[in-house]
Amino acid sequence: MDEFILKNYSLITRMVEFTAAITGIFLLRKYKNKEVKHFIYFLVFVAICDLLSSYTRYVLDDRFLSFLIGTKIEKNHWWATLFWKIGAIVFYSYYYQNILITPLFKKVIKIAISLFLIFSTFYIIFHWQDFFIRFFPIISVLGAIIIILCTILYFFELLQSDNILTFYKSINFYISAAIFIWWLIITPIVFFDQYQAYIYNVYERDWDYIYLRRYIYLSCNVLMYGTFTFALIFCRPKTLES
């Protein structure tokens, strides 16, 4: 089972990502709410970008991207940092600024994401060489804080409104619950990743940890994208526009 997960981790992840994205495309006409449409576009964007990040499989001596060997983009750390660890945070902050009603909540998120972008930009500039060979835990943690902030503000606003009576019909609720759980579980892993980051000898790696990490990531990805797919099918447009 461990070997199966290790070999098919990427395939299973791509399948759940594209399932959510394709479901959203087929149901695009169902939703009149522009924020939900933007969310569907985001799912397509993530699926494509995650697929492109697998280019590293072809950066080998006998593969067609062998000319990238020895270059700064030989690894995909830079790409994942840009499109997911920063890009996803920017999108969700935009999403919540549009679905929240309370002006103060909108302002808090706007300030938070502005500070995050400023910090991330300067941090990458001052750690330019590392940008291409590893992930930055500080950016991951700050991004997670913004996601958790956005979802908590949404849940707080939901509890204070009449929509709490029909929360189970709102796609915003499912999106919020899914990303809250994903970032809450995944973020602590970045601290444990550090002791594996510089172990290049495959025989010296902690394979028990690697298997566990794959299980956690795979479980969280299936849960999150499965929830997105379910919500897109189950939720009603009329509820989403209210």
Image (spheres, grey):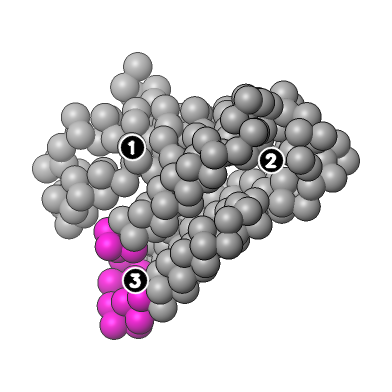
Q: Amino acid at mark 2?
A: Ala
How far, Cα to Cα, is label 2 from label 3? Answer: 29 Å
Q: Residue furthest left?
A: 204
Write the start and end of the magenta stretch as one range.
Answer: 119-140
Residue 169 appears left or right of 206 = right
Quadrant holding the C terminus: top right
Residue 81 position, x and y percent, is 42, 62
**137 is within the stretch colored magenta:** yes
Residue at 51% from the left image edge and 58% from the top image edge: 105
Q: Amino acid at mark 3?
A: Phe
Kindly indicate the quadrant of the structure image that contains residue 26.
top right
Kindly indicate the quadrant of the structure image that contains residue 240.
top right
Q: Residue furthest right?
A: 29
How far, Cα to Cα, is label 1 from label 2? Answer: 23 Å
Circle on res. 212: none
Q: Residue furthest top?
A: 1
Residue 233 position, x and y percent, is 74, 27
The residue tagged 2 is 21
The residue tagged 3 is 131
Judging depth in this view, the residue of 94 and 41 nearest the camera is 94
Please rate how many residues cluster around mark 2, counting C-alpha atoms within 10 Å: few if below 14, some from 14 to 19, many from 20.
many
Residue at 34% from the left image edge and 31% from the top image edge: 216
In this rendering, which labeled residue sits more in front, label 1 or label 2?
1
Judging depth in this view, the residue of 168 and 57 nearest the camera is 168
**Visible in this render: residue 33?**
yes
Label pair 2/3, CB-CB below 8 angstroms: no
**116 is within the stretch colored magenta:** no
How far, Cα to Cα, is label 3 from label 1? Answer: 24 Å
Predominant SS of the magenta segment: helix
The residue tagged 1 is 185
Residue at 72% from the left image edge and 24% from the top image edge: 234
